[in-house]
Image: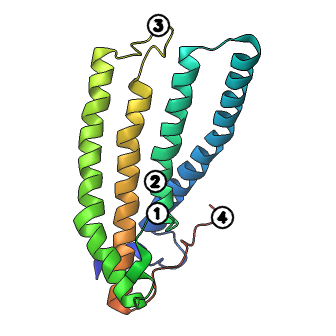
């Protein structure tokens, strides 16, 4: 079975799946540090607004853009760590093999197709922002929206890659009867 060679290291070498998960983990952890920056910007903005009645449209827009980046780049990482939203009403009672089957079917029918849809539409969205030079309609707003819109297809591509790895792991777990609830092995990467 081909997917087992993608998932199983040969003589201590890193697999393609581990490489993808390492990239997703680094980007996800990097995006999490943007929370600190966002908090500082919000605190300074609130302080200046309350104390000196100073605020700027671009600062408010920057807060929204940082939040969007954190959210978009955090989605693949949340999937990797199995911290995404799931209805556990029945799932937690399933056997490891049935959990793997649910993850496999969900990955094939929902996650992978929709991440490709997001990649395609996000790419168009970003390309339109680039070609039109789209920026804030507000005076003193952020002059260009392309960078934030370019994060959408990037996040979709990372979600697709992580979804592919997760789906392959679910297939391997279903085929062998092993549990899929374990954290990825590249935690320290």
- Does residue 96 appear anywhere in the picture? yes
Q: Which of marks 1 and 2 is in front?
A: 1
For the C terminus, the quadrant is bottom right
Q: Quadrant of residue 167?
A: bottom left
Looking at the image, tell me whether mark 4 or mark 1 is earlier in sequence order. Answer: 1
Q: Nearer the viewer, mark 3 or mark 4?
A: 3
Q: Which element carries disc 3, helix, strand or loop?
A: loop
Q: Which residue is drawn at 29% across and 77% down?
A: 2
According to the picture, the residue beneath numbered tag 1 turns out to be: 84
Q: Is mark 3 in CB contact (under 8 Å) with mark 2?
A: no
According to the picture, the residue beneath numbered tag 2 turns out to be: 75
Placement of 174 over or under 104, stated as above or below: below
Mark pair 3, 4: CA separation: 45 Å
Looking at the image, tell me whether mark 3 or mark 2 is earlier in sequence order. Answer: 2
10 Å crowding of disc 3: few (<14), some (14-19), many (20+) = few
Q: Which element carries disc 4, helix, strand or loop?
A: loop
Mark pair 3, 2: CA separation: 32 Å
Looking at the image, tell me whether mark 1 or mark 2 is earlier in sequence order. Answer: 2
Q: Position of residue 11 (x, y in %)?
A: 52, 79
Q: Is mark 1 in CB contact (under 8 Å) with mark 2?
A: yes
10 Å crowding of disc 2: few (<14), some (14-19), many (20+) = many
According to the picture, the residue beneath numbered tag 3 turns out to be: 139
According to the picture, the residue beneath numbered tag 4 turns out to be: 188
Q: Residue at x 55, y 73 (%)?
A: 183
């Amino acid at each position: 079975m081909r997917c087992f060679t993608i998932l199983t290291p040969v003589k201590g070498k890193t697999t393609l799946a581990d490489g993808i998960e390492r990239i997703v983990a680094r980007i996800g952890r990097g995006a999490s540090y943007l929370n600190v920056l966002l908090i500082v910007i919000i605190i300074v903005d609130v302080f200046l607004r309350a104390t000196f009645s100073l605020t700027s449209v671009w600062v408010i827009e920057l807060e929204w853009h940082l939040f969007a980046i954190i959210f978009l780049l955090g989605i693949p990482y949340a999937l990797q760590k199995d911290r995404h939203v799931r209805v556990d009403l029945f799932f937690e009672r399933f056997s490891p093999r049935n959990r793997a089957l649910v993850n496999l079917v969900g990955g094939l029918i929902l996650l992978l197709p929709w991440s490709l849809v997001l990649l395609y539409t996000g790419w168009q969205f970003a390309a339109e922002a680039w070609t039109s030079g789209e920026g804030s309609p507000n005076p003193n707003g952020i002059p260009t929206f392309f960078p934030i819109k370019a994060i959408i297809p990037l996040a979709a591509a990372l979600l697709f890659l992580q979804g592919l790895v997760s789906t392959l792991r679910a297939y391997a777990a279903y085929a062998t009867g092993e549990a899929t609830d374990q954290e990825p092995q590249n935690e320290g990467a």
